Image (cartoon, rainbow, N blue to C red):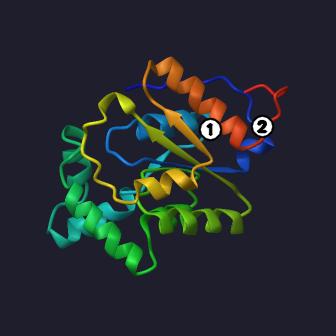
Amino acid sequence: MSIRSSSVRRGPLRTQMAIFVVSGRPRSGKTTVSAIAADFLGVQPVISSSAVSSRVEARLHLTPGTISAQRAIDPERFRPELIAEGNAMAAAGQSPGLLCVQAGSRVIDGMRRVSEVRESCAEARKRGLMPIVLFVENPRDAARVNDNSEGPGLRLLADAIIINDSSMTALRSRTLLAIRQASAWPASRPE
């Protein structure tokens, strides 16, 4: 997938935003929405599981980078191990999303816990950032397994719900509109 780089002007409001992309189901479009949001802000997106991968690799005695390489081929590979480790980290007060915010990330894809989003938003505010939570759902595949028991709670925390049921162009437009509305981006300002 390739998100075309935009030629938007960078402004102060963009430097103040932190965008957290969540959903209730895998393959809802979180990574695509994160890429669009990161392009809008002019930063690199981070997948929250990146804060977990090295811990799982160490526990399973895998070479560093193994999980990333395997998940590029099969996104479901290591999902249970990453979820379990992320849950353990959150229980210990070091949720993956929070660690990403503390490392300076401003677009984070895939937080799985209500507490993780709340802690990450609080940390972003402490850092002088305006957190925006985007919830992505893809109603075209309602039968797909929901592997996130906190999905409904995450949806309630969202500043905007993005429906991914159409084209890439529509998803991009909906994402940018959601960011502008959630941030009170002035209508007269260019993207």
Q: Which residue is label 2 attached to? A: 185
- The crowding category of the residue bearing disc 2, from other C-alpha atoms within 10 Å (few below 14, some 14 to 19, many at least 20), is some
Q: Is residue 145 left or right of residue 171?
A: left
Is residue 5 among what the camera can see? no
Report helix, strand or loop for mark 2: loop
> x and y percent of residue 21 in the render?
50, 47
Q: Residue at x 33, y 64 (%)?
A: 52
Which label sits on residue 21?
A: none
Residue at image location 44% in from the left, 20% down from the top: 166
Q: Nearer the viewer, residue 162 or 35?
A: 162
Q: Nearer the viewer, mark 1 or mark 2?
A: 2
The answer to whether 90 appears left or right of 147 in the picture is: right
Whole-percent x and y of residue 122?
Answer: 64, 68
Residue 133 position within the rendered picture, expressed as x and y whole percent measured from the top left: 58, 50
Count of marks placed on residues: 2
- Counting residues from the start of the chain, the first of labels 1 and 2 encountered is 1
Residue contact between numbered discs 1 and 2, judged by CB atoms under 8 Å: no
Amino acid at circle 1: Gly
Q: Is residue 88 left or right of residue 69?
A: right
Report the quarter where the N terminus lies: top left
Q: Which residue occupies 38% across, 32% down?
A: 139
Q: Which mark is residue 42?
A: 1
Determine if residue 48 is in view.
yes
Q: Could you say where residue 188 lies in the image, as x and y percent from the top left?
A: 85, 26
* Circle 1 SS class: loop
In which quadrant of the rendered image does the C terminus lie?
top right
26 or 44: nearer the viewer: 26
Instruction: Give the amino acid type for the residue marked by disc 2 in the picture.
Output: Trp
**Is residue 162 depicted above or below 8 in this figure?**
below
Q: Is residue 175 above or below residue 96?
A: above
- Res 53 quadrant in image: bottom left
